[in-house]
Amino acid sequence: AGAKASSLTDSISIVNVPWHRRMETLAVAVFMSALPLFGIIPVTTWFLLFVPYVNIVVALYLTFIFFIDKAPVTGSRISMWFRGCKLWVHFKNFFPVSLLKTAELPADGKYIFGYHPHGIFSFGAFSAFGTDGCSFSTLFPGVEVHLVTLNITLSFPLLREMYLFLGMCSASKQTFKNVLSKKGRAVAVVVGGAAESLKSCPGTIDLYLTKRKGFVRQAFVYETSLVPVLAFGETDTYQVVKAEKAELIQSRLQKMMGFALPLFFGRGIFNKLLGILPFRRPIHVVVGAPIAVPVFADVTVPEGQDGAGSKRRKRISELGEKWLFKDEGAELVDKIHAQYMDAVRKLYQEHKGRFFIERAHSMIIE
């Protein structure tokens, strides 16, 4: 009986909790509060549109969000102070999240960080690239990084302002164009997306990468280096409930809405047994070496033009993204994409013995 009482007490975290751990839980709770707010904010906004005088302010704000504000595709609202505030250090320490650099990234370069795996909420990506809690600015001085997310995430009034101050942007081609127009800039993208989140399960790293080539094309268009990032422990933060019927519904939701989540559970604010907060599991974010993409290509001159059939050297960025879907361009994309996947596999092989000991199976790339 005494042992059972002791076990129950250990599972309830109300008393005898150090102050720093309370602050860490609070920081993660602030992040997770976005989930209910995604439902509350639209309803509240709709209600306020029928309140005299207040509706004028709300209408003006909505007009600003949807027709005027370009920050979601430029990252212009970024605040280095907000990215580095103590709240995000507490967030990082909750798991904890560690950021490991394996190669230098010159400040005069441009980069696309490909983050793997997605996990449930990509806590490692948010901590490492969406904030400065992991000291990104110290490890990679002179590089300004913008984490991209679903467009809808940056459409919710008020909540969007927090994400914009962190420098987050919408996952659109316009974002890549604007952010990567200057040297010393970087975009971080969780490549596997919602489809990969449905594969999340503790002790696994299952990636959707074989057919994900859009980020590689963007690297060609904006003459940007690709940087593979592998996060060990990202999928360990929640327990996942597997149900065949539920998985079918989730898959359909993902195709219709662009996102879906598996059935999962974590811990609570005051207990360690059940809740929506993630479990305290370490996440090790390993940043690989940059992969330079070719700037020029030898292009076959089409028939009807002088020198038809011969090769001419042209700048790929001037050929445009459409060329990258054609035979010669597609072959070049496939070549760099294969090189990128090899780099991801290399990161896994080099660090699995240190960070991925308790694994259900080896990394899978689909």
Image: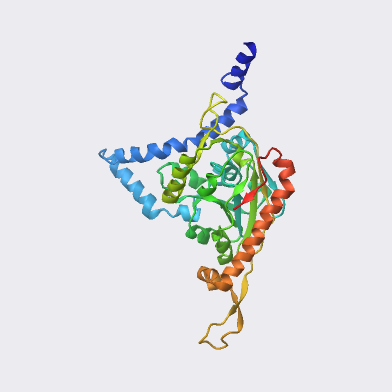
Vertical side of 157 occupied by 172: above or below? below
Quadrant in the rendering for residue 40: top left
Q: Residue 203 in the image: state x and y as whole percent.
A: 64, 39
Counting labels gives 0
The relative height of residue 201 versus residue 292 in the rendered view (above or below) is above
| Residue found at the far bottom of this picture | 306
Residue 267 sits above or below residue 120 on the image: above
x, y percent for residue 346 = 71, 53
Taking depth in this image into account, of 357 and 229 the one nearest to the observer is 357
Residue at 44%, 43% (x, y): give it.
249
Q: Residue furthest front?
A: 244
* Pick the front one: 18 or 272: 272
**x and y, in percent, of residue 189 in the image:** 56, 52
Q: Is residue 135 in view?
A: no
The residue under the point 61% across, 45% down is: 128
User: Can you say whether 144 is above or below 268 in the image?
Assistant: below
The residue nearer to you, when weighing 173 against 207, is 207
On the rendered structure, is 199 left or right of 285?
left
The N terminus: image quadrant: top right
Q: Is residue 194 visible?
A: yes
Q: Position of residue 156 (x, y in %)?
A: 41, 44
In which quadrant of the rendered view does residue 313 lie?
bottom right
